[in-house]
Image: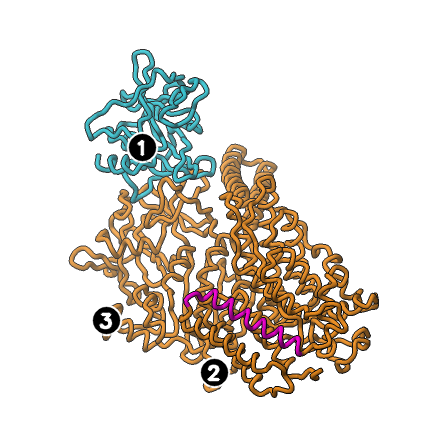
Amino acid sequence: MNVPSPSTTLDTTATRRGGKYLTFALGREEYGLEILKVREIIGYMDITAVPRTPPYVKGVVNLRGQVINVIDLRARFGLEPVERTEQTCIIVVEITAAGRKLSTGIVVDRVSEVLNVAEESIEDAPAFDLSVNTNFILGMGKIGQSVKILLDIDKVLTDAEVRTLAQAA
Amino acid sequence: MPKPSPITAAASELTGQVVSRLVGLGADDLPELASVHDLMAQLASQLQDASAQEVPALGQLIAMSAQGSRIVEEVILREATDATAALRQATQTIADMQAILNDVHNPDTTMTGGMPASGTDGDTGNAKVDPQPSAIDANVQNVHSSSDFAPVQTDATTPSLPLYPPVTPPVPTPLKTQFTAETLNSDDLPLISEFVGEANGHIDAAEAGLLALEENPHDIETVNAIFRSFHTIKGVAGLLNMRQIGALAHAAENLLDLARKEELTLAGAVVDVVLQSIDLMKAMIADVDAATRSGQPLTVQAGLPGLIEDLRAAAEGQPPEGLDAIPTTQSPQGTPGSVDQDVNPPRVDLEVNTSALDAKVNSAAGNSAAPSSKANTSAANTAPAPGSEATVKVTTQRLDKLINMVGELVIAQSMVVQDVVTIATGNPRIARNASHLGKISRELQELAMSMRMVPIQGVFQKMARLVRDLARKATKDVELITVGGETELDRNVVEAISDPLVHMVRNSVDHGIEAGEARVAAGKPRVGKVELRACHEGGNIVIQIKDDGQGLRKQRILNKAIAAGVVKPGQELSEAEILRLVFHPGLSTAEKITDISGRGVGMDVVRKNVEALRGQIDITSAEGQGSTFTIRLPLTLAVIDGQIVRIGTHRYIVPITSIEESLRPKANQLSTVQGRGEQCLLRDRLLPLVRLHKLFKVTPQEQDPTKALVVVVQDAQRRCCLLVDELLGQQQVVIKSLGEGIGAIKGVSGGAILGDGSISLILDVPGLVQLAMNTDAV
C-alpha cells in the first residue's frame, strides 16, 4: 500500500487514516471524527422523542426544514447517561448508508477541537475482550500524551453488530 | 402457357401468410403455431380441390404442404428434436411452395420483366442468408418510395402484379436481419439519457394516439402525431447509432406513412403490430437506459427482425396476424386490368400495396406521373413537432428541494411575523405587511406543491391498453370508459397507484365481465363496460373502477371464508363486511376462491398498496349487475390535514381523515375485560380504548379517561379510541420522513414541522390499531 501524505488523505479506508479530525468528548474519553464527515455542529435543541425505537435513538430534530434523527452516542456505546450541560451539543454528520447519503445528529458531551493526526501516529485498536467492539474504530490517534479514539462513524451508525451490542448494553 | 388461375393466386397468398407467421415464431408459442397449422390445412384443402390442369406440379405442391404441416404438428406435439430447426425447415418448405406457385402464377415474368425468377422467390432464398441490416431498410423503403428502390425487385414483381392486384402481394421476405450487440458511445451518454426521456415521452404519446385512433380511425392529425413520434425516435436513434431502435422506428414509420397518406387504415391487426412495436421500443429504450448506467452493450432483441417483418407485411397489406387486412377508405375502382390502367391515378386498389406498387410501375416505365410523386412523399416531409406549451424539465430531486425550502420559508415567515407583531403591536403598517407576506408565502407554497401534480391521464392510458389486450386475449368485448383523466394528483401517488389499478382492471375484465354469450343470455348488452373515473372529493382523490359484469358472489365468499376459518360459522356479517373479505390475505390469494368468487386475485396486495398511500378502498357489488371499487387517496403524499393532540408534553398529529369523533367519555361508558382490556361503549358499539401513552411510553397528564379525551379513529375495518390529554388544533402539515436512520416505525408514519419549528410525530392509525390489538398495552 502507498503511504499517502497525511494532509491530503481523508479516505476512510483503514490504511489511509491520517488527516483532520474533529475531536469531542464523552465523559473522560476523547473521540475523533473525520472532518469531511461533519456537516455542522449545532447547540442542543429540543429533540422530539420517537417511540418504539432503540434506546440510543434520542429522536428527531428539525434542521432547517430537514428532519434528521439524533443518536445518543453515550447510549450507543453503553456509557452511563449524564445530565445535559451548556457544552452538550449535536454534531451533524453525513454518513453513507446503503449507498445513500444520510444526515444524522450525534449527541456528545463536548466538542474539543480540530486536530491534524499524522498517519504514523495512528495505531490499530488493541484487542480487548469480547465486550468491546472495535469494528467501528479506525484507529487510536496519539496526540502528545493523550489518545483519541478515531471513529469510523459510518460503522458506528449503521453496523448491525454495534446496534445489537448497544441494545444488549 | 397455362392460364393463371385464382386457385394458384389464393394458394400463393396463403403460403405468404404462413411464411410470414412462421418467421420468428417461437417453438413454444402454441396458439400461434396452432393457427399456422390451421392455415396450412386450409392451404392443403385448396390444393386438393385444384385440378392438375389449373395447377402444374400439383402433386409436388400437395406433398410439400403435407410435409410442412407435419413438421409444424411435430413441433406442437413436442416431438421435434430441434424445434427451431424444424420450424426453419417448415418455413423453407412453404417458401419453396410459394416460389413454385408464383412461377406457375406469373409465367410471363421472364417475358416482361428483366429477371428470370420471380422476385419473391429470389427474396425468399436470398434474404435468409443475407445478414445485411440495410436490407430491411431497402425493402421497406421500396414499398412507398419509388425514388430509391432497387430496380431488381421492380422488374420481378410489378409487371405481373396488376393482373391480380388483390391476391399476390410480394412475399413477406423472411428476412432474418442479424443485429449485433451495440455498444453505446460513452461520449454520447448525456445525449442518450436525454434521448431516453424524450423517446419514452414519444412512445407514450404514440400509444395513446393509437388507442384514440381505434375509436376514430380517420383522425389524420393523430396519425400524423404518431408518425412524428416514430420519426423523431428514428432520427435521434440514427444520430446516436442505435441501429435496432432505428430499424424498428423506421419500419413503423413506413407503415404509419401509408396511414398518413390514407392508403392504409390504422385498425385491427395493423394497430396490433404497431402496438407490438411500441412495446418492443419501450423495452429497447429501457435497455438503453440500463446500458447507460451499466456500460453493457445493448441486448440484441430476438423478436426484432420478426416484428420488423410484420410491420413490413402490414405495410404491404398483408395481415401479420392472419386477420384480414383493413382495406383503405377509398373504395376500389375499376377491375384489375392492364398495366396502362394501373398508371391512371384514380385507380386505387383494395390492397394497400398496389398503390405503392403503382409507383413502382411508373418508375419502371420511366414515367413520373402523379401517383409516383404521391408515393414519394416519404419521411422527408415530416412536419415539425406539435405545438405545446413550452416546458422545462426539472429533476424531481430539485423539485423536492424547492418544496422543502418553501415549506421552511413558510414556517420561518410565521415565526418572524409572530415576533414582529408582538413587538410592534398597534402599528397597522407592520401588521398589514406581515399579513401580505403571509399571503405570498402561502401562495408560493401552493404553487410549489402544484408542481408535483400530474394528471392521472397517463395511468388511464395504460389501463386503456391493458383492457384492450386483456379483452382480446379473453375474446370478450369490453369497452373502457375513462372519466376525469385530467384530475391531478401527486406524482408519487400516480406512480404508486398504477399497480393496484392494473390489478383491479385486470380483475374486472378477466373475472367481472362475462363472455359475450353469457351477457346476452343475462339480458345485458354484449359489450361489457369498464369505467374508470377520477375526481376530487373533499380533499381526496377518488378513483373508481366500475364494471357491469357478474358482480361478487357474496354467499360463496362467505362460505369460503368460513371454510378457511376467517369467519366463524354463525357470525353475523353485514354485506359490506362480506365484500371486504376479498381483501383478506387468507382468502384473496387462494387460487380456489378466485375461480368461484370471480374476483379477488391478490386483492390484499391492492389494499396494502392503497393503505400505504394513506388511502382507503371500498367495494359495492350487486350480483349479476357488476361491482364498483372505490379508492380514496389523499391529494398528495406530502401534505395532510392533521389534528394536533397532546399527551403530557408530547404533541402528535392524527390525520383528520381517520378521525371519526372526539369526546370525553363518561364513567358508565367504560368497562374492562379481565381487568385489563379497556373498552368504551359508544352508541351501542364497543370500541377498544388504547392508552397511547403506554404504547409510546410517555407520561400523560391524565390517566383517567373521564378527565381526558378519547379520539375515535378508524382504519378500513376497525375502530378504536385513543386516549389523549387535549386536542390542540388542526392544521395542514407537510409530512416528512423520519429518515432512513430510524426507518419504519409501527404507529408513526412520519414527522411534521409545526409552526414553532419543533417536530411533531404523525400517527399511523392502521399501525396503531394493529399494535393495540396485538399487544396487551391497552
Q: Quadrant of residue B332?
A: bottom right
Chain B, chosen colour in render: orange
Position of B392 compared to B412: left or right?
Answer: right
Viewer-side label of 1, 2? 2
Which residue does the numbered mark 2 point to in the structure image? B519
What x and y, as percent, mark residue A44? Answer: 37, 29
For image coordinates 33% across by 69% down, the residue present is B591
**Which of the pair B91/B183 is nearer the observer?**
B91
Q: Is residue B206 magenta?
A: no
Q: Is residue B84 magenta?
A: yes
Helix, strand, or loop for circle 1?
Answer: strand
**Which of the pair B171/B750 is nearer the observer?**
B171
Circle number at residue B568: 3
Which chain did the image draw in cyan? Answer: A
Tag 3 near tag 1, CB within 8 Å: no
For the residues beneath circles 1 and 2, the answer to whether they share a chain is no
Circle number at residue B209: none
Tag 2 near tag 3, CB within 8 Å: no
Q: Work out whether residue B486 can be spotted.
A: no
Q: Work out whether residue B477 can be spotted.
A: yes
